[in-house]
Image (cartoon, rainbow, N blue to C red):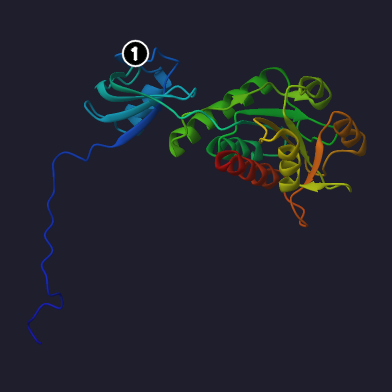
Amino acid sequence: MPGLSPFPFTLTFTFSSRRPMPDFRVHCQPTDPAAREIRLSSEESHHLVVVNRCARGDAIVAFDGRGHEWICECADPAKSATVLRVKEFRPAQPRHGAITLAQSLPKGATMDEIVRQATEIGAARIVPLITERTQVHLEGDRANKKIEKWYTTAIEAAKQCGNPWLPEIAPIQKLTDFLPTTGDYDLKLVASLHAGTTSLKSALTHYRSHHARLPQRILWLVGPEGDFSPTEMTALIMSSFAPISLGPLVLRCDTAAICALSILNHELSTN
């Protein structure tokens, strides 16, 4: 009717002078579980206080990347050395298994995204590799700076997704140097476009039928654009890697990495 509000109710807005208390996440150095106070690095302090505008009294979760978390409140929001007051120590649930991603270095910034997503999924270790068809070659200071950047990327990913574990990021190394160090894995798998592959499900089923359990330490190896060379694939098979197909489509190396990590993580966590 004319003159009546089209809404049969009244909206009332209330504004508070104090913003809601957020639940910030910060990375801290390994700390005594019984610590009553945590002092953050200058980088973490700056990001928390200047970028995220954390204030005194705000709730914060600090984690060390090793499965330990501390429920805290901000005691001193100093821009270069924030101090947190610990209220509770909270250990994370143990991992169901440890998955290592060994990734031949892709072009551009693709490795940054692989590290981010691998951290979110829960990879325990990431090994950047140089293979015959790798088009990116990093040495010396450039290699060290890249590893530092990837570690920072992993920290930011863990903050965002709530993962209390950070992956170890190994030095960049040649595939030929890496292979002799892979003897301790329960199951070694390589993404392959060559003939004679099996499915990821079949490889896990085969392992379980012979060991009455799922593997606890898995290595997933992904080649560069253009896949591994025939010589490399022969060396991998001789080193007990099972060639795995992820389906009839040719996947990008980053897609192959994350697809398999997701499946493996799901299988380990549900069995």
Task: Tell me if I can see residue 104 in this picture.
Answer: no
Residue 133 in the image: state x and y as whole percent. Answer: 84, 36
Residue 211 in the image: state x and y as whole percent. Answer: 72, 33
Is 204 located above or below residue 215 in the figure? below
Give the camera-side residue of 38 and 184. Answer: 184
Left or right, residue 166 beside residue 229: left
Q: Secondary structure at mark 1?
A: loop
Location of the N terminus by quadrant is bottom left
Quadrant housing residue 238? top right
Is 150 located above or below residue 31 in the figure? below
Q: Residue at x 32, y 19 (%)?
A: 82
Residue pointed to by mark 1? 34
Task: Tell me if I can see residue 127 in this picture.
Answer: yes
Residue 109 in the image: state x and y as whole percent. Answer: 64, 39
Q: Residue at x 60, y 35 (%)?
A: 115
Q: Residue at x 63, y 26 (%)?
A: 146
Left or right, residue 207 beside residue 65: right
Given the image, on which type of amino acid does mark 1 rest? Answer: Ala
Is 196 located above or below residue 116 in the figure? below
